[in-house]
Amino acid sequence: MDADLALVDRILVPVDFAEAERAEDATFSVDGVDVHVSAASLRAIRWAVAIARGAGPACRLRLFHATPALDLNSVYAGPAGGTLPTAAVQEIHERANRFAVAVLERIAQDIRGDVSVEFAARPGRPVDAILVEGRNYQPDLIVMAASGRSRVARFFLGSTADRIIRRAECPVLVIPATNTAKASS
């Protein structure tokens, strides 16, 4: 076993569900709902699984998804008290988290093999949710997919991966949105 891989006991893999189906995306059906996952996210999971295998049987992998948060609903409802009740927001978040975990479990069925995999989801903006999960889980490595946005869009909007690289408390491995290594060989 490589000495550097022995330093890896926990790997966090943020997984983004794709907004629309593209030819290279994979589709997973959970409870009759089709969820699209980008090819880059699947490659990130495969990379993490390979690293976990190389690190040894004690290495754990956590697949994580940030679900949309509803805590800003008061902005849209106005000051007249038209916000959703806290219990309703909590129930929506719990349902979203259960569904996201079910999707992550479904994804892992095809990929994980003999690697120990955990699943988690939390509401929030992806950058913030990933950083909170990182502080709680304390991974030795974060493996994530690049967004696939154009350079111009990344320049103006930034990217989740860019922000995670700058703010994470551990090394971050970013998997390109396209598999350029295979395409050029």
Image (tube, helix red, strand yellow):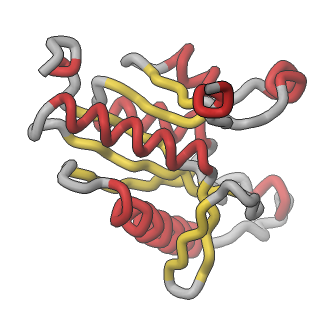
Q: Is residue 80 left or right of residue 7?
A: right
* Outermost residue, bottom side: 32
Among the 4 quarters of the image, the one containing residue 185 = top right
Q: Is residue 39 left or right of residue 154?
A: left
Residue 122 appears in the picture as rendered: yes
Residue drawn at x 12%, y 33% is 56
Vertical comparison of 14 with 82: above or below: above
Q: Is residue 121 left or right of residue 178?
A: left
Residue drawn at x 43%, y 62% is 107
Q: Position of residue 154 (x, y in %)?
A: 80, 25
Among the 4 quarters of the image, the one containing residue 55 = top left
Q: Position of residue 121 (x, y in %)?
A: 44, 55
Q: How many numbered marks have been drawn onto this rendered protein structure?
A: 0
In the foreground, 173 or 168 = 173
In the foreground, 143 or 163 = 143
Q: Position of residue 173 (x, y in %)?
A: 46, 23
Q: Quadrant of the N terminus?
A: top left
Residue drawn at x 38%, y 54% is 120
